[in-house]
Image (cartoon, rainbow, N blue to C red):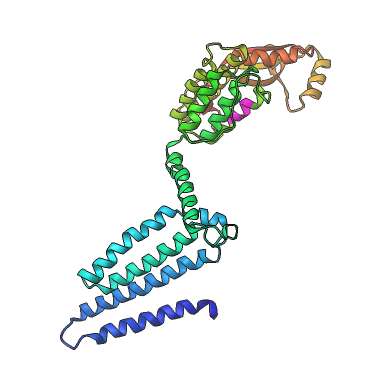
């Protein structure tokens, strides 16, 4: 019952206000429509009061929470004064529209409450701090965060992962050049993304080509626009050539990632792409059993050259050859075969 008191009070105020308006004018001075319009105006005022109360009620209980205080735009709250006060003066001094004046008073009260909460005035950690100091802090925070929404609207989908890809690609050859750092910082600042400070030379963590490939695939799994994905190819190439030296590791990574992106685009637009298939060709039953133990997820299949294990398909010949070399090093014969693949027909 107690929790619903404000609804009951609002309803009573609505009835009383409507009744007063209906009785305010002598019979014949106002038409039925004008009286009805007066009821609507008075009810709108009551509803504005209830709306204001409910708005403040939800946040008032949490006014001491610093996160809640920081979530309020102090500039927007203070603009409430700039908007409400002129309307209040106009309604009282010029138009004598007291209903509008009452609505302006409600708006000014809301502006005051949200300004006080937005400055963090009620936060326990801010006790003893002057209001002007709190206001300055709130305005400074507002300045820093004012572009967040716009940046999110302008930055491409998966921008954070694009930056991570560039950082890892720069370290793929175990050396980060200043030119690569400058390029990364340029896009990080453009998209308003904070990144750790990068220094030229040997990276703190070793970049694994397989992990980097997984990161690229994770980015593509988010479903970026094909135009943005294709632009990433140019960005990856630009990154690899930033220091005027393309190492073997960078060339292999660029070729593989270019193929991965081409695969993604082909799925979206259709068409064939060139891929390299890696096969392990066992030399006898002993090697078939050995491969079965090492790679239990693979099944032996009959191909034109006999029985083979199909390891996978890759987008660059260099990457496929590197995979082959891994199996050759443990005594398993493997080869690569070029294939034209249309993924849209494999769905």
Q: Is residue 214 magenta?
A: yes
- Tell me: residue 247, above or below residue 63: above
Along the horizontal axis of the image, is 4 left or right of 38? right
Where the C terminus falls, by quadrant?
A: top right
How far across and down, in percent of the image, does residue 342 sit? 52, 23
Q: In front here: 126 or 320? A: 126
- Tell me: residue 231, above or below residue 79: above
**Magenta part of the chain:** 212-217
Where the N terminus falls, by quadrant?
A: bottom right
- Tell me: residue 185, above or below residue 340: below
Query: Is residue 304 visible in this depiction of the protein?
Result: no
- Overall secondary structure of the magenta section: helix
Tell me which corner region of the image, top left, top right, bottom left or bottom right, holds residue 100.
bottom left
Q: Which residue occupies 33% across, 81% down?
A: 17
How far across and down, in percent of the image, does residue 228 sit? 45, 29
Query: Is residue 93 visible in this depiction of the protein?
Result: yes
Q: Which residue occupies 25% across, 71% down?
A: 92
Count of all numbered marks drawn on residues in the image: 0
Q: Which residue occupies 66% across, 16% down?
A: 278
Q: Which residue occupies 82% across, 19% down?
A: 290
Q: Is residue 86 magenta?
A: no
Tell me which corner region of the image, top left, top right, bottom left or bottom right, holds residue 256.
top right
How far across and down, in percent of the image, does residue 75 sit? 41, 53
Looking at this rendering, what residue extends furthest in the right direction?
286
Along the horizontal axis of the image, is 180 left or right of 302? left
Tell me which corner region of the image, top left, top right, bottom left or bottom right, holds residue 38.
bottom left
Looking at this rendering, what residue extends furthest in the left direction?
28
Q: In front here: 291 or 254? A: 254
How far across and down, in percent of the image, does residue 277 sit? 63, 17
């Amino acid at each position: 019952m107690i929790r619903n008191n404000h609804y009951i009070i609002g309803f009573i105020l609505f009835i009383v206000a409507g009744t007063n308006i209906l009785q305010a004018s002598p019979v014949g001075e106002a038409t039925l429509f004008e009286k009805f319009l007066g009821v609507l105006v008075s009810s709108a005022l009551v509803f504005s009061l209830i709306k204001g109360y409910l708005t403040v009620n939800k946040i008032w209980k949490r006014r001491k929470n610093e996160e809640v205080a920081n979530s309020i735009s102090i500039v927007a709250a203070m603009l409430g004064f700039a908007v409400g006060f002129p309307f209040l003066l106009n309604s009282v001094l010029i138009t004598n529209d007291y209903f509008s004046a009452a609505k302006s008073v409600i708006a000014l009260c809301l502006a005051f409450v949200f300004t006080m909460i937005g400055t963090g005035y009620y936060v326990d950690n801010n006790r003893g701090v002057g209001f002007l100091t709190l206001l300055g802090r709130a305005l400074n925070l507002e300045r820093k965060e004012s572009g967040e929404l716009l940046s999110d609207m302008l930055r491409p989908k998966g921008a954070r992962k694009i930056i991570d890809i560039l950082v890892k690609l720069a370290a793929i050859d175990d050396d980060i050049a200043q030119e690569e750092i400058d390029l990364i910082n340029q896009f990080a600042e453009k998209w308003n993304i904070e990144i750790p400070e990068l220094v030229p030379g040997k990276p703190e963590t070793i970049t694994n080509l397989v992990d980097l490939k997984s990161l690229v695939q994770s980015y593509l799994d988010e479903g970026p626009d094909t135009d943005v994905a294709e632009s990433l190819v140019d960005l990856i190439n630009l990154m690899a050539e930033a220091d005027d030296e393309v190492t073997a590791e960078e060339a292999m990574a660029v070729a593989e990632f270019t193929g991965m992106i081409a695969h993604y685009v082909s799925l979206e637009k259709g068409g064939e792409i060139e891929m390299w298939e890696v096969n392990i060709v066992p030399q006898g039953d002993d090697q078939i059993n050995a491969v079965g133990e090492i790679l239990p997820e693979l099944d032996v299949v009959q191909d034109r050259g006999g029985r083979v294990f199909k390891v996978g398909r890759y987008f660059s010949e260099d990457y496929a050859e590197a995979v082959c070399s891994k199996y050759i090093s443990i005594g398993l014969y493997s080869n690569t075969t070029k294939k034209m693949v249309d993924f849209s027909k494999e769905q």
